[in-house]
């Protein structure tokens, strides 16, 4: 199991000092899956806040409704405590005070953490579907 995790970290170009940038994580996951001959990917997508097409709240909601758990890259922003950090988006909630992403994060180890969505506090997102 550790060898498999190391292979994934290597494919994603992870370093203990800097972690992994989201583009390397996306491409590294594809390399990892190809190298280990895992079942074929049924779908994948990557979106950034400077790509076309980009992403918006409707896109995020649709992906979650389709069962696509997404890797989300958060940027440093004074509106939240995350500082250039990646999380796993597993759900969403629309409320009267805003739109929230339900995230799984290694920092909290909870699936009940909600993060207020704004277009500017995310750098990008991606998913793979089997």
Image: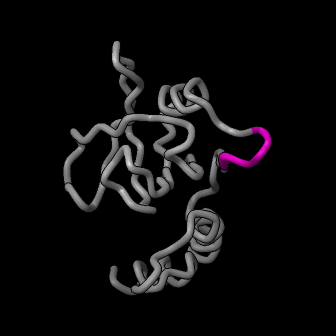
Above or below residue 30? Residue 72 is above
Q: Is residue 6 magenta?
A: no
Quarter of the rendering containing residue 76 = bottom left
Q: Is residue 51 magenta?
A: yes
Q: Is residue 82 left or right of residue 65?
A: left
Which residue is pictured at 49% across the width and 26% down the height? 65
Main secondary structure along the magenta-highlighted residues: loop
Instruction: Point out residue 101 in the picture as x, y percentages from the top left corner.
Output: 39, 35
Quarter of the rendering containing residue 13 = bottom right
Quarter of the rendering containing residue 83 = bottom left
Q: Is residue 37 visible?
A: no
Instruction: Point out residue 63 in the picture as x, y percentages from the top left corner.
Output: 55, 33
Above or below residue 62? Residue 119 is below
Q: Is residue 93 left or right of residue 19?
A: left
Boundaries of the magenta span: 48-53
Instruction: Point out residue 59 in the picture as x, y percentages from the top left corner.
Output: 61, 29
């Amino acid at each position: 199991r550790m060898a498999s995790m190391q292979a994934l970290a290597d494919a994603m170009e992870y370093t203990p000092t800097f972690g992994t940038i989201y583009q390397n994580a996306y491409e590294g996951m594809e390399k990892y899956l190809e190298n280990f001959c895992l079942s074929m990917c049924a779908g994948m997508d990557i979106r950034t806040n400077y790509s076309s097409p980009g992403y918006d709240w409707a896109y995020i909601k649709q992906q979650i409704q389709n069962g696509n758990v997404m890797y989300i890259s958060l940027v440093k922003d004074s509106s939240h405590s995350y500082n250039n950090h990646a999380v796993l988006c597993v759900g969403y909630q629309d409320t009267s005070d805003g739109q929230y992403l339900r995230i799984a994060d290694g920092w909290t180890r909870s699936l009940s953490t909600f993060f207020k969505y704004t277009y500017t506090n995310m750098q990008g997102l991606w998913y793979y579907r089997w």
